[in-house]
Amino acid sequence: MERPGSLEKRIGAVVIIVMESDRIDALNRILSTHASMILGRQGIPLRDREMNVISLVLEGTTDELGALTGKLGRLPGIRVRSVMAT
């Protein structure tokens, strides 16, 4: 059963912290499969801390945004936080 409003597209922002650089290929594969939702992407390498920060601006349904962040969050060495506009 569809939740009310679940098909309505929303704007969201996701911050991804990559703590293990050997996970970047898997991360990029997931992002590529969801490329149609990505409005903007910025990556910042923090070499002195041996981590990378990626920020995304997305547009998609709540279900689509949840599917993407869920896949990312299951990757070891990756931390994901998201926020969606109401």
Image (cartoon, helix red, strand yellow):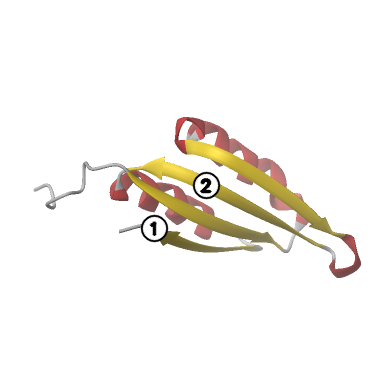
Q: Residues within 10 Å of mark 2 (few under 14, many from 20)?
A: some
* Residue occupied by mark 2: 57
The residue located at (43%, 55%) in the rendering is 70
Between residues 86 and 50, which one lies in front from this camera angle? 86
* Residue located 85% across and 69% down the image: 49
Q: Which residue is mark 1?
A: 84
Image quarter for residue 17? bottom right
Q: Secondary structure at mark 2?
A: strand
The residue type indicated by label 2 comes to: Val
Determine the secondary structure under disc 1: strand
Left or right, residue 41 beside residue 86: right
C-alpha gap between disc 1 and disc 2: 10 Å
**In this image, 27 relative to 8: left or right?**
right
Q: Is residue 50 above or below residue 62?
A: below
From the top left corner, tell me how far across and down residue 85 is, in percent. Answer: 36, 57
Percent x, y of residue 86:
30, 59
Query: What kind of residue is marked 1?
Result: Met
Across and down, in percent, residue 34 comes to 48, 36
